[in-house]
Image: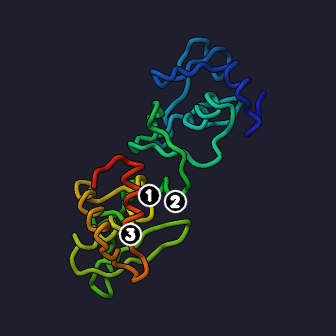
Amino acid sequence: MAYLNDLTQEYLKSILFYDIAGDYWVWRVGGRGGTYAGMKAGSLRDGYLVIKIDGKSYRAHRLRHLYLYGVWPTNELDHKNRIPWDNSEGNLRDATSSQNKANREKFSNNTSGFKGVCWNIHLHKWNVQIGKDNKLIFLGYFTDLIDAAQAYDRAALYYFKEFAFLNFPELKGQYLKESVNGRKIGWSKSNRITKADLAQYALETGLEL
């Protein structure tokens, strides 16, 4: 019986089979909470596929890493398409906590309609901020909602590059070209995306600037 992170690749493979192409799990053994050999494993919880092994619940995307590589992921695993149950090949990437959160959509209680933007009832302006490394970075106050949403986008690209979830993804090329031309990000005189930054980003993503 495995406990907590004592679960090993050898033990995992002895009780479960993972089909990489189909992205599904099958029990090799039965007798675990009504399971039987050949039965598909896992159930959805908070959008994630979760598999219970010896009384402990594991998210399938982390089990997948152990199953394929023999070790637990050292960081978080981000789902590129933001579908938490989709652990298919190419959809998972190593990420810090900040990068993982950057690729999330706006919260369900968001009232502005745009990520990173909320209304300041005292100033009667739109407040823009972004989270990084468990800290909130203030980006400024704006009278125009669209300007506020785009300010968040530019900051997200600056800090998180390919992990950034944008309010206006169709404007990504425009944001990058503006930055290459030396436009200030807007929330600090010292923060600016340089040509070198964007050249490296273009190299990593294959984006033509």
Q: Secondary structure at mark 2?
A: helix
**Residue 7 drawn above or below residue 17:** below
Cα–Cα span, label 3 and label 1: 18 Å
Image-based side of 181 in relation to 189, left or right? left
Q: Position of residue 136 (x, y in %)?
A: 48, 73
Which label belongs to residue 102?
A: 1
Cα–Cα span, label 1 and label 2: 6 Å
Would you say the residues marked 2 and 3 are in contact, meaning their CB atoms lie under 8 Å apart? Answer: no
Image-based side of 12 in relation to 65, left or right? right
Cα–Cα span, label 2 and label 3: 19 Å
Q: Which residue is mark 3?
A: 193
Circle 3 crowding by C-alpha within 10 Å: few under 14, some 14–19, many from 20: many
Residue occupying the point 49% across, 53% down: 100
Q: Position of residue 44 (x, y in %)?
A: 49, 35
Question: In the image, what residue type sits under mark 2?
Answer: Ser
Q: Which residue is mark 2?
A: 98
Q: Position of residue 81 (x, y in %)?
A: 38, 42
Circle 2 crowding by C-alpha within 10 Å: few under 14, some 14–19, many from 20: some
